Image (tube, grey):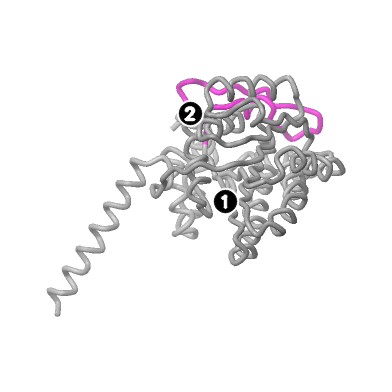
Amino acid sequence: MLDFLFYCFLGILFTYIILLVLILMGDCDLYLQFASKFGKKPRASSGIGECLAYELAKAGCKLCLSARREQELNRVKKQCLLHGNIKEEDILVLPLDALKFETHSSATQDVLKYFSKIDILVNNAGRSQRALFEETSLDIDREVIELNVLGVLSLTKQVLPHMLERKEGHIAVMSSIAGKLSAPSSASYTGSKHAIQGWFSTLGVEMSDRNIKVTLLCPGPVFSNLLETAFTGKAGEELKGKMESSEKRMSTPRCAELCALALANGLDEAWIALNPVLLFTYMFQYFPNLSRVGSKRMGLKMLKKIREGKV
């Protein structure tokens, strides 16, 4: 009996060691295979949104590209046509402001008039934020919530009835690793991503028997223009931050590729990050109390370095 228990213990230990090695070597969840889809892509003029549009175009997806800057959308459209597997008529450029909720209904109807259906909605609107909780005004909290949460909810609520009527669809939202743990010096942004996690994980459960998939995409540190336009703690102010090439961040194309794979496989949630951020995410998910104690012992400076890819 003791020998049996000993070998069981060794088997469990060996399994955990293998899982740890896979996590340390990985940059995303590992059970991904690719398949082509079709979709609507808000906020597609920069960063992850732009690169994801390219990935979907290569897969042959018909695209509606939306953001505020029409000139940038046309630039992205040109690149999609140049490198993708689609034709001119397969892309609709539709300028859209996520904060102008009253325009979301007509924008959705414009897409349906052009394509007749929406298979996938990818919500990518949002801005980051950098400031301590004590330094952040309530006005900033409100602005972040309106853009990162309410703007996303508004557009989703316009598209969802169409998917329910068709009895099929796929809704994806760009969350963040910050929505899975506590990210210091960005309480407003972190709070907004936790809200996204709550709203859309609930939607996923509600839609589970109605043939509508919901995918939460959770990138960690990625090279992008995110810090340039990030909120600070004061209203009307932008961080104007720059990322250094030496920082440990995932490349934007790689992040977009993994997002596309997660969509193609209909994953409920995908963590897309390099280590040590990916390892911390697993720790916070499965050992939350231990991870909180460890975070406090590490201190604010070290956590900020990890968050900015400097460790």
Badge count: 2
Q: Nearer the viewer, residue 284 or 88?
A: 88
Q: Quadrant of the N terminus?
A: bottom left
Residue receiving disc 1: 215
In this orientation, does residue 137 appear? no
Looking at the picture, does residue 281 appear above or below residue 251?
below
Q: Residue at x 80, y 43 (%)?
A: 109
Left or right of 120? Residue 137 is right
Q: Mark 2 belongs to which amino acid?
A: Ser
Q: Residue furthest right?
A: 102
Picture disc at residue 174: none
Proximity of marks 2 and 1: CB atoms separated by less than 8 Å: no
Residue receiving disc 2: 251
Q: Magenta span covers which residues?
A: 221-247
Q: Residue furthest bottom?
A: 1
Q: Position of residue 106 (x, y in %)?
A: 84, 42
Q: Nearer the viewer, residue 152 or 61?
A: 61
In this orientation, does residue 191 appear? yes
Residue 233 magenta-highlighted: yes
Q: Residue at x 46, y 32 (%)?
A: 254
Q: Position of residue 130 (x, y in %)?
A: 66, 34
Q: Quadrant of the C terminus?
A: top left
Q: Mark 1 belongs to which amino acid?
A: Thr
Q: Residue at x 59, y 32 (%)?
A: 53
- Quarter of the view holding residue 13: bottom left
* Label 2 environment density (alpha carbons within 10 Å; few <14, some 14–19, many ≥20): few
